Image (cartoon, grey):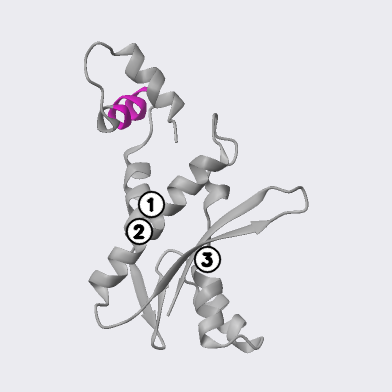
């Protein structure tokens, strides 16, 4: 996948080598991105988890009220885990210049790999399935989702 904006930055800085790390540094500074956003993105890629009633959830997505409501409405504990842990990758890219479904797919693959690694590290005796899902909309476009369950 071509990173066209990155390629523009590389060209502007040639003949010097310009790495992806240089790009993050340069683009982040030029866009005046708050430091909090870098930490938030790091937490998205390497998330914190919580264990509730023997199930593992994304800490940032967990809501006791939502969890109880899912169970009260007939969801199994595994179904509740699914719905609490599903994350919309394409929604993250809404209204961002130059985004494409290829960006969504690439980012979802990175999240899948990093979430798998973090879950293995934090819960080595447990087995998780981290999946990238494609949900086709009426307009033919796909929603790209990531979720993990046991």
150 versus 121 height, above or below: below
Question: Nearest the camera: 146 or 102?
Answer: 102
Whole-percent x, y for residue 142 in the image: 64, 51
Quarter of the image where the N terminus is located: top left
Mark sitting on residue 28 = none
Left or right: 58, with 48 as reference point: right
Per the image, label 3 sits on a secondary structure element best described as: loop
20 versus 30 height, above or below: below
* Residue positioned 76% across, 47% down in the render: 139
Q: Residues within 10 Å of mark 2 (few under 14, many from 20)?
A: some
Question: Nearest the camera: 34 or 26?
Answer: 26
Mark sitting on residue 113 = 2
Per the image, label 2 sits on a secondary structure element best described as: helix
Is 124 inside the magenta-drawn segment?
A: no
Left or right: 136, with 46 as reference point: right
- Measure how far apart labels 2 and 1 are at the Cα level: 5 Å
Whole-percent x, y for residue 17 in the image: 22, 20
């Amino acid at each position: 996948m071509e990173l066209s904006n990155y390629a523009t930055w590389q060209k502007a800085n040639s003949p010097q080598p310009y790495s992806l790390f240089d790009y993050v540094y340069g683009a982040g500074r030029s866009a005046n991105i708050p430091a909090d956003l870098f930490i938030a993105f790091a937490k998205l890629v390497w998330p914190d988890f919580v264990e509730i009633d023997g199930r593992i959830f994304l800490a940032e997505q967990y809501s006791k009220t939502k969890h109880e409501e899912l169970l009260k409405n007939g969801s199994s504990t595994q179904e509740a885990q699914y719905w609490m842990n599903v994350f919309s990758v394409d929604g993250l890219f809404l209204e961002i210049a130059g985004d494409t479904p290829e960006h969504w797919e690439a980012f979802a693959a990175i999240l899948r790999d990093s979430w798998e690694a973090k879950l293995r590290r934090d819960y080595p005796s447990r087995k998780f399935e981290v999946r990238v899902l494609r949900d086709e909309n009426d307009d033919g476009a796909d929603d790209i989702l990531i979720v993990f369950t046991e």
